[in-house]
Image (cartoon, rainbow, N blue to C red):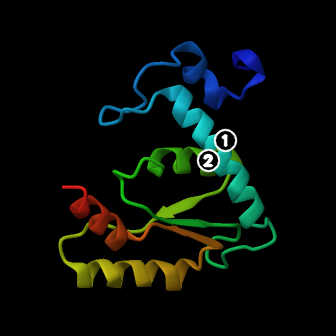
Amino acid sequence: AAARGGSSKDKVEVESPELPAWCTSASTYTQVTSRSRILAAGLAATCPEGVVSPAVGSPLLAVQVPRTHPDFVPLLVAASRRGLPFVLLSTDLPDLAKEAQRNSWILENLQPSLLVKVDVDALADKAQSSV
């Protein structure tokens, strides 16, 4: 077991807490670990274990969050903490019609128990207004 009574998922955070968590991030392992714990608690509260995806026979999380969003990696770690399988929906395909078609197919066929989504248009508007 990892130090500080954490899980093995926390091992890197314990050994190197202030290293960057991934190469394009300003987040450290400590920040990712902390945020993932908060998100895992939220997932536990909003995704009841009895609600299963008929396609996979267990709860399933659909994630429609841009890879550049600060909660993208912590959310995936949070799902892992909960033992919750996830499927990533597209947020950045150049062909918006194909993106919508792909996402619709996934939602219809996999029937996830919970969808975590970021309003990409609102993010774009916010980014443009700050320029």
Expressed as whole percent of the image width and height from the top left, the position of residue 129 reads 24, 63
Q: How many marks?
A: 2
Q: Earlier in the sequence, mark 2 or mark 1?
A: 1
Q: Secondary structure at mark 1?
A: helix
Residue at x 47%, y 45% (from the top left corner): 73
Depth check, front residue: 5 or 53: 5
Judged left or right of residue 80, residue 16 is left
Q: Which residue position is annotated with label 1?
A: 37
On screen, residue 91 above or below 31 = below
Quadrant holding the N terminus:
top right
Q: Is residue 22 above or below residue 82?
A: above
Alpha carbon distance from label 2 to label 1 = 6 Å
Considering the image in quadrants, where does the C terminus appear? bottom left
For badge 1, the amino acid type reads: Arg
Give how far across and how far down residue 47 sits, in percent: 72, 66
What label sits on residue 113 in the rendered view?
none
From the image, state whether disc 2 or disc 1 is nearer to you: 1
Q: Quadrant of residue 86?
A: bottom right
The structure residue drawn at horizontal position 65% and vertical position 56%, both measured from the top left corner, is 84
Disc 2, disc 1: CB below 8 Å?
yes
Check the image and report above or below for 31 versus 49. Answer: above
| Along the viewing direction, whichever of 131 and 98 lies nearer the viewer | 131
Give the residue number, with chain letter if any, for mark 2.
78
Q: Position of residue 117 (x, y in %)?
A: 49, 68
Q: Is residue 11 left or right of residue 101?
A: right
Residue 11 position, x and y percent, is: 61, 22
